[in-house]
Amino acid sequence: MIHQKKIGILGGGQLGKMLAIAAADWSLDIHGLDPDKEAPAKGYYKTLLCGDFNDYNTVMSFGQSMDIITIEIEHVNTDALKELKEMGKTVHPEPEALEVIKDKGAQKLFYQRNHIPTAPFYLCENKQAILSLVENGVINIPFVQKSRSAGYDGKGVLVVDDINKLEKLFDTSSLIEEMADIDKELAIIVSRNESGEYSSFPAVEMLFNPVENLVENLICPADISEQAEKTCREIAKTIIEKLDICGVLAVEFFLNKDGEIWVNEVAPRPHNSGHHTIEANYTSQYQQHLRSILNLSPGNTGLCTQKAMMVNILGEANHTGEANYIGLEEVFQMSNTYVHIYGKKNTKPMRKMGHVTILDDGSISIKDKAKKVLDTLKVFSK
Amino acid sequence: MIHQKKIGILGGGQLGKMLAIAAADWSLDIHGLDPDKEAPAKGYYKTLLCGDFNDYNTVMSFGQSMDIITIEIEHVNTDALKELKEMGKTVHPEPEALEVIKDKGAQKLFYQRNHIPTAPFYLCENKQAILSLVENGVINIPFVQKSRSAGYDGKGVLVVDDINKLEKLFDTSSLIEEMADIDKELAIIVSRNESGEYSSFPAVEMLFNPVENLVENLICPADISEQAEKTCREIAKTIIEKLDICGVLAVEFFLNKDGEIWVNEVAPRPHNSGHHTIEANYTSQYQQHLRSILNLSPGNTGLCTQKAMMVNILGEANHTGEANYIGLEEVFQMSNTYVHIYGKKNTKPMRKMGHVTILDDGSISIKDKAKKVLDTLKVFSK
């Protein structure tokens, strides 16, 4: 019975918090592990153990008292997860899949091996190796350097669009990708359970902040052809099956100007590109993840609105310290507009502090409303 | 700023739990008071103080450390609430309104005084007074006895539809109502904030379990004329204004066979008849209550689906003890079907253990689906 399962989540950020809120409807027994004792999920998990999810012993001791172990961040200790699986614990996603995904180089090799379309790439051991390939005309500017092991949300990523940027290259084992000639960036959330039941959410279109490499807002459904949507869903299905993952998987795509679709990268957990599903879809990505790891049937992934947008609420530039939300009351006056505040005590520039989802109500354009939210709601320090 | 307000809720049942889940989106600082240290809201409130909300000193000491005090059950100590208000605390709903509502006799006198249509009634001090009025032909069988001060969910209510039932009359101060010739029972949730902004949700139609006097399921929108809907909304608006209540107020109506509409009773808090708003409406009654007590603008109360039903999941007859949910996996297979389990450890006959909301998906009839849920999901003891 689902209530007798003790579910442990590695990580206690906003994704963990939203998983816990989804779990509350069913009174699931949810516990978490995070190095920050004031992590956003605190007070929403039944218990929050303060510790490092990258540390073997910490993950082992946390996981041993759980029945099911899952994640809300992929940078965790996979040796411990493998050991817990050996001991008979249910671990979703597969630790082996996590290892492939955590290493951006291994992830690209996985796509290549499985004939999944992705941007051409080179793997380089260090800065010198990259410079040599540039010198020999193998790699052409502009290109992107991605540290194989580090980070997400634009961390460990360098866009080299000018010869002078070469000196800024990270001296680390890297994935080099030539710049795709991108028309749109898309994402699809898919899910799978132990019985092999599969679902996919409608594609979303992501719009990035031009300065930082962070999703600023997204719109759903994506303005793409039926064929492109179908191709994305098929690719996403292939990936979740080949990786043998139970849970949700977010797959990010480039739709190139020539119409080709390339996989950019994946995340084996609820994802920023699925926040809107809380209000815009019959089932949220969070409940879908819980359904998947509990081996329940997937819920209906359809949109229950014509159109939805999600805007990330990021810490304002030049503001570091205790968070102060400006313009909140005005946003509450906007119809069909859903505020999510993550409860992080301190803000810093570009930190994800919350998000707002907007459902189409047929009045003013949804894009104008999204712009109004971004112009109105600001996170300053006190 | 809404995050700096400490919100205290008297009661920690399922209504409190769902208020806390709604508050989680905004990371509000929610605390509760309940005599049961394992109350459903435990783990969803930031803290749960174990104590009696009918005790003056307990409510005072709980309320003194809060900025805003509200309720999820109306049977609380109103003297303490008045005192807290005197001290400058924000108290919603008004303690004076609570006193009117808690006493079913005073509630009826309030309707009479304000020309609000309601069933004809008599107030009797004890069993003997009732028997005299029956003997003198003033009160006719069938009638309903309602204890003026006790209970909800059918407690303290006796239907006298046969002369032999007279001996079962409670010997207590009572409200006597002649039986209305009812076509339908309806409910409307309304809200109001300190700025006087008002909203009302679409009317729902309630279907009662014929054995116990408990709502078994409800459907929204109600199958009534536009004029009847308009009348209900107008009456509900008059009541919330005359009672000077901030927060949500549930108003239950009888639609009589002759077309007349009578107010049955009200509850100044989120209500069983508004559970479906979590999934079926753009704004839930829980977020509307929070918006109202925080003096934020009301959210859109419209339905985001064609039709919705809510079924209460009640403890099975002859089962008392640790709860065991039968058929849960099957219900998770039904599309657009939303399970809510309140997390009560023990079940007993007719105890409210959860509810399921069903949104129309145009496939099989929503009423058939509701019946299937009721036939499938059972709460047994272990």
Image: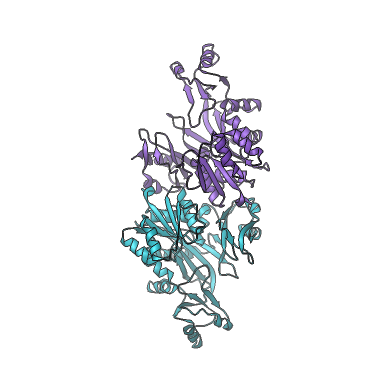
Chain colours: A purple, B cyan
Camera-side residue of B220 and B320: B320
* Residue A160 appears anywhere in the view: yes
Task: Measuring from the top left, give residue A183's x and y in whole percent.
Answer: 52, 29
Toward the bottom, the furthest residue is B136
Task: Measuring from the top left, give residue B310's x and y in whole percent.
Answer: 56, 59
Toward the left, the furthest residue is B87
Q: Is residue A130 left or right of residue B109?
A: right
Task: Measuring from the top left, give residue A330's x and y in whole percent.
Answer: 37, 46
* Residue A192 appears anywhere in the view: no
Q: Is residue B34 left or right of residue B63?
A: right
Toward the top, the furthest residue is A136
Q: Residue at x 31, y 60 (%)?
A: B87
Count of labels in the image: 0
Q: Is residue A147 left or right of residue B87?
A: right
Camera-side residue of B113 and A59: A59
Camera-side residue of A349 and B276: A349
Instruction: Write down the quadrant of residue A311 in the picture.
Output: top left
Compared with residue A275, is residue B260 higher up or lower down, i.e. above or below?
Answer: below
Camera-side residue of A173 and B107: A173
Screen quadrant of the C terminus of chain A: top left
Task: Measuring from the top left, give residue A47's x and y in whole percent.
Answer: 51, 47
Q: Residue at x 56, y 67 (%)?
A: B214
Compared with residue B160, is residue B92 higher up or lower down, i.e. above or below?
Answer: above
Q: Residue at x 37, y 63 (%)?
A: B81
